[in-house]
C-alpha cells in the first residue's frame, strides 16, 4: 500500500476511535542498510536508505494533560500522564513515544495532551528500524504539536537518546539519522564521526533493492549488541585511538600480540567494513554493480566470521543468492541491521527480480520450514508531515 493510502487508513482509524478528524498526520520510514554494518558506533561510515515502509501517526489535541495512544499495529492502548515525570513502563511499545516526549520536555517544551493512532508497515523486529521509525514519527508529531522545530541532527540524536534511555538499547546513530534525513531516490552516505551526510543517487530502473525477511529473531540481541560495542571500545583503547575509525589494518596487525583473538577479529571487521563502505559508495556513483555486489558478499562474510552477528537463516539466504549469481540477476547480498535474524539486502537486476524472489522464497522455505517475507523498495523519503 502506498503512503497516501496508508495515511488515509490511519486517519480513518483515528476518526472511528476518537470521533473526530486528526489535526496532524506524520510519517517516518524504516531503513535498510546497503553496507557499513556495526560501524556507526565506531565513528565510521554507513550507507543506508529509507524504505517505502512507514510508521504513521494521526493525532489531535484533547485539551487535557494526558496522551492517549492506540496502536493499530497490535491493538494495544497506552496512557501517558503529563503531570508526572515520564518514565519507562508498560506497554513496552509506548516507551519509544515516552522517550521522545521526555526529550522534548528536557528541551524546555510543554507538551499538550493529545489522542493518537499509531500504525506501521515496517516489519517489527526485522532489523529495518521499526523502533527508529516510531521515535522519529513521534518527534515529527511533537514538532507540530509544540511548534518547536529541531534541526535534523538534533532530532535524530533526541530519538537515539529515547532508544538508549527508554528501550535500553545502546544503538548507534544510523537508524534515527536515516529515518530523519533519507531522500527519495538516494542512498545516504553518513559519516558517523562528523555527522555529515552525502546523498548518492540510486535511480537506475534496472537495479532493484530486494529485502528478504528471514522471519527469525534470535534472542540475546540486546545483550550481544552491547557486548560487541564494548569489544570495539576495548580494541580502540588497546590501539590507543579514540575510536576504530582512526585505526588501520597495519596498526591492528602490529597490535595482534596485545589483544585476544576475539577483540582482534571484531576490530578487523570494523576497519575493513569502513573501507568497503567507502569503496561501495565510489562504485555506486559509477554504476559498477558487480563491484558493489562483491563488497556486499565480503561484508557478510566479515559479519559472519569476524563479528559473529549472523545466524544460519541469514547465511542461507546469502548462499541461495550467491548460487543464483550474476547470471541469474543477483549482484550481491548480505545481512542488514544488527543481526541475529532479521533481514538480508540484495542488489538485483529489476527484470529478474520476480524470478529471484520466488526462487529464494521457495528454497528458503524448503530448508527452514519458515516462510520468509520478500519485498523490494526504492529509496524512500525521510520523516514528513502529511497534514
Ligand atoms: C542496529 C543499531 C544501529 C547499527 C546497526 C548495525 O540497527 O540500531 O545503530 O549499529 O544495528 O549496523
Image: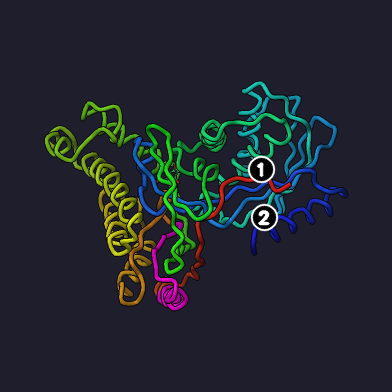
Given the current orientation, which residue lies at the most extreme top position? 108
Q: Residue shown at 63%/54% (left/top)? A: 120
Image-quadrant location for residue 292: bottom left
| Disc 2 element | loop
The number of callouts visible is: 2
Query: Residue 283: x, y in percent?
Result: 31, 55
How many angstroms separate mark 1 from mark 2 (CA)?
13 Å
- Note whether residue 165 is visible: no
Q: Which residue is mark 1?
A: 91
Label 1 SS: loop
Q: Which percent across, then down, holds residue 304?
A: 30, 54
Instruction: Examine the rendering and report whether any part of residue 49 can be seen.
Output: yes
Magenta span of residues: 342-363
Classify mark 2: residues with Cα within 10 Å, few (<14), some (14-19) or many (20+): few
Q: Residue at x 70, y 50 (%)?
A: 71
**Residue corresponding to mark 2:** 73
Q: Is residue 186 left or right of residue 18?
A: left
> Depth check: 311 or 246 in front?
246
| Residue 233: quarter of image | top left
Q: Position of residue 19 (x, y in %)?
A: 88, 49
Q: Is residue 228 left or right of residue 159?
A: left
Relative side of 360 to 181, left or right = left
In depth, the one of 229 and 176 nearer the eye is: 176
Q: Is residue 192 above or below residue 273?
A: above
Amino acid at each position: 500500500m502506498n503512503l497516501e493510502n496508508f495515511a488515509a487508513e490511519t486517519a480513518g482509524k483515528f476518526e472511528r476511535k476518537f470521533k473526530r478528524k486528526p489535526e496532524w498526520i506524520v510519517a517516518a520510514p524504516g531503513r535498510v542498510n546497503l553496507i557499513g554494518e556495526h560501524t556507526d558506533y565506531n565513528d565510521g561510515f554507513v550507507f543506508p536508505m529509507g524504505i517505502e515502509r512507514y510508521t504513521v501517526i494521526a493525532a489531535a489535541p484533547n485539551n487535557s494533560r494526558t496522551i492517549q495512544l492506540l496502536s493499530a499495529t497490535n491493538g494495544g492502548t497506552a496512557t501517558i500522564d503529563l503531570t508526572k515525570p515520564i518514565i519507562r513502563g508498560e506497554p513496552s511499545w509506548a516507551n519509544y513515544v515516552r522517550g521522545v516526549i521526555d526529550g522534548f520536555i528536557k528541551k524546555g517544551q510543554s507538551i499538550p495532551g493529545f489522542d493518537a493512532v499509531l500504525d506501521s508497515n515496517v516489519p517489527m523486529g526485522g532489523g529495518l528500524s521499526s523502533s527508529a521509525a516510531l521515535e522519529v514519527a513521534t518527534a515529527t508529531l511533537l514538532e507540530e504539536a509544540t511548534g518547536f522545530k529541531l534541526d535534523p541532527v538534533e532530532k535524530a540524536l533526541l530519538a537515539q537518546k529515547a532508544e538508549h534511555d527508554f528501550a535500553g538499547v545502546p544503538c548507534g546513530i544510523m537508524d534515527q539519522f536515516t529515518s530523519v534525513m533519507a531522500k527519495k531516490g538516494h542512498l545516504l552516505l553518513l559519516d558517523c564521526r562528523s555527522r555529515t551526510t552525502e546523498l548518492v543517487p540510486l535511480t537506475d530502473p534496472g537495479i532493484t533493492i530486494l529485502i528478504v525477511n528471514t522471519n527469525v529473531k534470535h534472542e540475546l540481541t540486546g545483550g550481544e549488541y552491547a557486548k560487541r560495542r564494548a569489544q570495539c571500545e576495548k580494541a580502540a583503547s588497546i590501539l590507543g585511538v579514540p575510536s576504530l575509525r582512526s585505526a588501520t589494518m597495519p596498526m591492528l596487525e602490529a597490535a595482534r600480540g596485545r589483544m585476544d583473538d576475539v577483540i582482534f577479529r571484531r576490530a578487523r571487521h570494523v576497519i575493513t567494513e569502513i573501507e568497503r563502505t567507502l569503496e561501495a559508495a565510489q562504485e555506486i556513483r559509477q554504476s559498477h554493480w558487480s563491484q558493489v555486489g562483491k563488497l556486499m558478499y565480503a561484508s557478510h562474510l566479515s559479519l559472519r566470521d569476524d563479528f559473529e552477528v549472523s545466524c544460519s537463516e541469514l547465511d542461507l539466504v546469502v548462499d541461495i543468492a550467491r548460487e543464483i549469481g550474476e547470471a541469474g540477476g543477483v549482484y550481491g547480498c548480505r545481512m542488514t541491521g544488527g543481526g541475529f535474524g532479521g533481514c538480508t539486502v540484495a542488489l538485483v537486476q529489476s527484470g529478474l527480480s520476480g524470478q529471484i524472489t520466488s526462487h529464494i522464497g521457495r528454497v528458503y522455505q524448503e530448508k527452514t520450514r519458515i516462510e520468509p517475507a520478500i519485498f523490494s523498495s526504492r529509496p524512500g523519503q525521510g520523516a514528513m508531515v502529511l497534514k
